């Protein structure tokens, strides 16, 4: 089992949106960075843990826990000329971008980025590194356990 931090802008898809979705599951779409895409395509497996992170908002932070619940498939938005994620170079025969399904497992309090920065056990977390802007990053088992314990303690 692996662990991931996946960023979503809450005005596009919030953790509450995932909770309200059928089977509390959404397609993770719109990833347009090759490294993040490669994580989804090559490394993510059903059952992997996900820290669902709200980004590009007044208070960014971890909003809940989720899990990967499927295998990668072509992201339909790349073929939609009306989508902001449209990629004219992508074709159904040779898609460039993929989606993966994510299911909410537990809503938590918002664990703000500012608080994450104060936790010594997380100092090596990719999210907290200077210049880190990837929408999907790996999380170590130790980092996952630290965050989950903190959230359980606060519950």
Image (spheres, grey):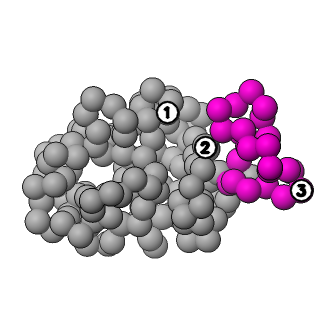
Q: Return the mark for residue 13.
A: 1
Q: Is residue 51 above or below residue 23?
A: below
Which residue does the numbered mark 3 point to in the structure image? 93
Q: Secondary structure at mark 1?
A: loop
Left or right of residue 65, residue 28 in this image: right
Q: Nearer the viewer, residue 104 or 85?
A: 85
Q: Earlier in the sequence, mark 2 or mark 3?
A: 2
Labels 3, 1: front one: 3
Which residue does the numbered mark 2 point to in the structure image? 30
Quadrant in the rendering for residue 72? bottom right
| Quarter of the image that includes the C terminus | top left
Q: Position of residue 146 (x, y in %)?
A: 20, 63
Left or right of residue 64, residue 124 in this image: left
The residue that appears at 23% across and 70% down in the rendered structure is 124
Q: Main secondary structure of the magenta part?
A: loop
Q: Position of residue 42 (x, y in %)?
A: 61, 71
Q: Are marks 1 and 2 in contact (CB under 8 Å)?
A: no
Q: Earlier in the sequence, mark 3 or mark 1?
A: 1
The residue that appears at 85% across and 50% down in the rendered structure is 91
Q: Residues within 10 Å of mark 2 (few under 14, many from 20)?
A: some
Q: Return the mark for residue 21.
A: none
Q: Are marks 2 and 3 in contact (CB under 8 Å)?
A: no
| 82 falls in the magenta region | yes
The residue that appears at 79% across and 43% down in the rendered structure is 88
| Range covered by the magenta-colored residues | 75-98
Look at the image and tell me whether residue 85 can be seen: yes
The residue that appears at 48% across and 64% down in the rendered structure is 48
Q: Position of residue 63 (x, y in %)?
A: 32, 41
Q: Earlier in the sequence, mark 1 or mark 2?
A: 1
């Amino acid at each position: 089992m692996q662990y991931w931090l996946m960023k979503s802008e809450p005005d596009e898809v919030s953790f509450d949106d995932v909770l309200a979705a059928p089977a509390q599951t959404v397609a993770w779409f719109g990833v347009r960075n090759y490294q993040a895409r490669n994580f989804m395509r090559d490394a993510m497996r059903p059952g992997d843990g996900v820290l669902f992170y709200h980004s590009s908002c007044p208070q960014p932070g971890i909003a809940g826990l989720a899990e990967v619940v499927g295998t990668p498939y072509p992201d339909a938005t790349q073929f939609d000329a009306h989508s902001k994620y449209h990629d004219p170079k992508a074709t159904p025969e040779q898609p460039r971008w993929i989606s993966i399904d994510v299911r909410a497992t537990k809503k938590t309090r918002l664990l703000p980025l500012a608080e994450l920065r104060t936790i010594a056990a997380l100092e090596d977390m990719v999210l907290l590194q200077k210049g880190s802007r990837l929408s999907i990053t790996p999380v170590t088992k130790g980092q996952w356990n630290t965050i989950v314990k903190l959230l359980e303690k606060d519950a």
